[in-house]
Amino acid sequence: MSEHLLVFPDRETADDVAAELAHEGFSEVRAVREALAGEDDSEDHEWAVHVVEEMVADESGPVETGLRDRFSALAEEHGGWYDPDPIPPT
């Protein structure tokens, strides 16, 4: 299993990226409100897309590396950033 977190400044962007990835067939994709370290005010929270891909058996292999590269580029393209080591949202 492979988990990824793409963080965006607004909900609309997160929803659009989540819909795009869900359409591509990832196992689980959801947009969530993300409280980042050091942010106390709920207005400062960003939006994130949490992606779980069940079909990745080797997290150090080429498939995982390809997913990380893809998600990093996708986040940057939409004005966000990619967290390579996410803590799963609750």
Image (spheres, helix red, strand yellow):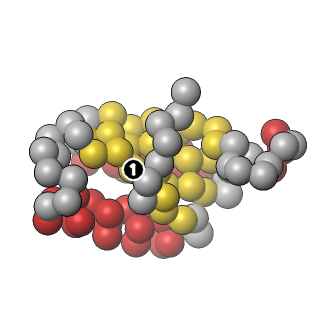
On the image, which quarter does residue 18 sit in? top left
Say which quadrant the N terminus sits in: top left
Residue at figure coordinates x 56%, y 47% from the top left: 48
Question: Which residue does the numbered mark 1 point to in the structure image?
Answer: 4
Q: Position of residue 12 (x, y in %)?
A: 61, 48
Q: Is residue 61 above or below residue 23?
A: below
Between 59 and 25, the one nearer to me in the picture: 59
Between 21 and 45, the one nearer to me in the picture: 45
Q: Position of residue 10 (x, y in %)?
A: 67, 52
Left or right of residue 16, residue 12 in this image: right
Q: Is residue 59 above or below residue 52?
A: below
Between 65 and 28, the one nearer to me in the picture: 65
Q: Residue furthest top?
A: 90
Q: Is residue 16 visible?
A: no
On the image, which quarter does residue 65 sit in? bottom left
Q: Is residue 86 visible?
A: yes
Q: Amino acid at mark 1?
A: His
Q: Is residue 79 above or below residue 5?
A: below
Q: Residue furthest right?
A: 41
Residue at figure coordinates x 82%, y 39% from the top left: 42
Left or right of residue 27, residue 79 in this image: right
SS at mark 1?
Answer: strand
Estimate how packed mark 1 is, as few (under 14), some (14 to 19) or many (20 or more) residues with alpha carbons within 10 Å. Answer: many
